[in-house]
Amino acid sequence: MIKSGSKNIRILDLGCGKGEVSRYISEENSVYGLDISKIALKEGKAVYGRCCCGRCRKAAF
């Protein structure tokens, strides 16, 4: 959950998919996306950029 009006915070979006939510909340925050689907991330990188493929248990964040 993100408090309404929060700015300049770092957020890890687990299960980011194509990055629609990441793109929206990144307007005033630093957001990184993580998803297991390479296909969704390929589309997401074209739109958003800061995302990587992997499992959250092995994430280096």
Image (tube, helix red, strand yellow):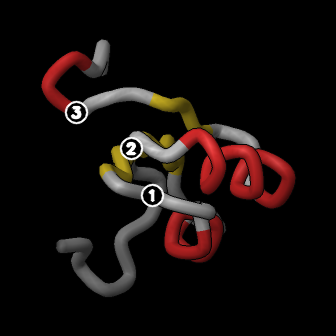
Compute the Cα span from label 3 to label 2: 17 Å
Q: Nearer the viewer, residue 50 or 37?
A: 37
Residue at x 49% of width, y 46% of height? 37
Furthest residue toward bottom: 4
Residue at x 61% of width, y 63% of height? 18
Q: Nearer the viewer, mark 3 or mark 2?
A: 3
- For label 1, the crowd category at 10 Å Cα-Cα, with few meaning under 14, some 14 to 19 and many 20 or more, is many
Q: Image height check: is 21 above or below 57?
A: below
Mark 1 secondary-structure assignment: loop
Q: Which residue is mark 2?
A: 10
- Percent of width and height locating residue 17: 51, 60
Q: Earlier in the sequence, mark 1 or mark 3?
A: 1
Residue 16 is tagged as 1
- Percent of width and height locating residue 10: 38, 44
Q: Earlier in the sequence, mark 2 or mark 1?
A: 2
Does the CB distance between marks 2 and 1 fall below 8 Å?
Answer: no
- Judged left or right of residue 44, residue 52 is left
* Amino acid, disc 3: Cys
Mark 3 secondary-structure assignment: helix
- Judged left or right of residue 53, residue 50 is right
Compute the Cα span from label 1 to label 3: 11 Å
Does the CB distance between marks 3 and 2 fall below 8 Å?
Answer: no
Quadrant placement of the C terminus? top left
Furthest residue toward right: 46
Residue at x 49% of width, y 41% of height? 32
- Percent of width and height locating residue 1: 18, 73
Q: Image height check: is 31 above or below 54?
A: below
Q: Which residue is mark 3?
A: 56
- Percent of width and height locating residue 3: 23, 78
* Amino acid, disc 2: Arg
Does the CB distance between marks 1 and 3 fall below 8 Å?
Answer: no
Residue at x 31% of width, y 86% of height? 4
